[in-house]
Amino acid sequence: MLNLVLFGPPGAGKGTQADFLIEKFKLAHISTGDLLRSQIAAKTELGIEAKGYMDKGFLAPDSIVIGMIKSILQENKKANGYIFDGFPRTVEQARALDVILNENGTPVSGMLCLCVEKEELINRLLHRGKTSGRSDDHDVSIIENRIRIYNEKTKPLIEFYAAQNKFFKIDGVGSVKDIAHRVIETVGSL
Ligand code: B4P
């Protein structure tokens, strides 16, 4: 079973590359950003709580996100494997994911980290903000906060997965297709 963690700062191309991996390896796509946005759109209690954090560029609380992952994995038990897109984002989330997957005897196969410089990230997100309607893509200070939070809370996961020999660094700059080629080649080597 292939369980991939698609990793990188906001705007690195995680959602974009997930589409190629789904097509190629027929995996179930689990994007915590998409799940949270659908809770917000449905105006659920969870969505209303998460919105307060996301609009300002902060992470949603671990308890919310981990609970969401547990129920989505429960609903998709027959999948060939999973692409975790934007999850885990904190060490607590990564530990929880290891516990859940190890219980099923299907651990994380590899963490694919897309590397992109800050200036390019900001340009991509502002560009997307023109059409996405996402409240966190319009304002440079909110985007910078997302990148700051990534550096503080999420980047330490590189060490977490490197210690398990599961960290794979991929250049995230270039054409979307070239990057997809690099990503697929890396997955093929796992
Ligand atoms: P996400 O939905 O995961 O959003 P993101 O980090 O901005 O990445 P995304 O996948 O959307 O963008 P991508 O890099 O594909 O999270 C949003 C918020 O939800 C978080 O800030 C947080 O508040 C909350 N959240 C989500 N998961 C959480 C968790 N686990 N714990 C707590 N909170 C959580 O691409 C961005 C843009 O770049 C696109 O427009 C794309 O077209 C463009 N692009 C991609 N590749 C390109 C390339 N090669 N060249 C040029 N442009 C490219």
Image: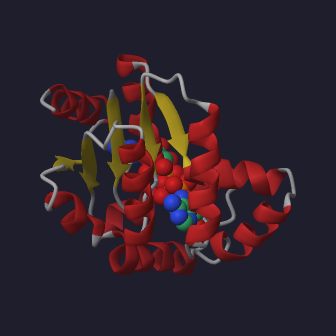
Depth check: give the residue in front, 151 or 134.
Answer: 151
Judge from the rendering whether residue 169 lies leftward or rightward of residue 147; answer left or right: left
Judge from the rendering whether residue 189 lies leftward or rightward of residue 172; answer left or right: left
Residue visible at 51% across and 34% down in the picture: 29
The image quadrant of residue 36 is bottom right
Q: Is residue 179 above or below residue 25?
A: below
Coloring scheme used:
secondary structure
Residue visible at 22% across and 31% down in the picture: 187
Judge from the rendering whether residue 132 lies leftward or rightward of residue 69; answer left or right: right
Residue visible at 31% across and 42% down in the picture: 107
Q: Quadrant of the N terminus?
A: top left
The percent coordinates of residue 51 (x first, y second) are 73, 68
Instruction: Evaluate whether residue 107 shows in this view.
Output: yes
Q: Is residue 74 above or below residue 159?
A: above
Depth check: give the residue in front, 82 or 95.
Answer: 95
The percent coordinates of residue 113 (x first, y second) are 26, 52
Q: Is residue 39 above or below residue 139?
A: above
Instruction: Evaluate whether residue 173 shows in this view.
Output: no
The percent coordinates of residue 6 (x first, y second) are 36, 46
The percent coordinates of residue 19 (x first, y second) are 45, 30
The image quadrant of residue 129 is bottom right
Depth check: give the residue in front, 61 or 168.
Answer: 61
Judge from the rendering whether residue 176 lies leftward or rightward of residue 181; answer left or right: right
Depth check: give the residue in front, 14 or 36.
Answer: 36
Q: Quadrant of the C terminus?
A: top left
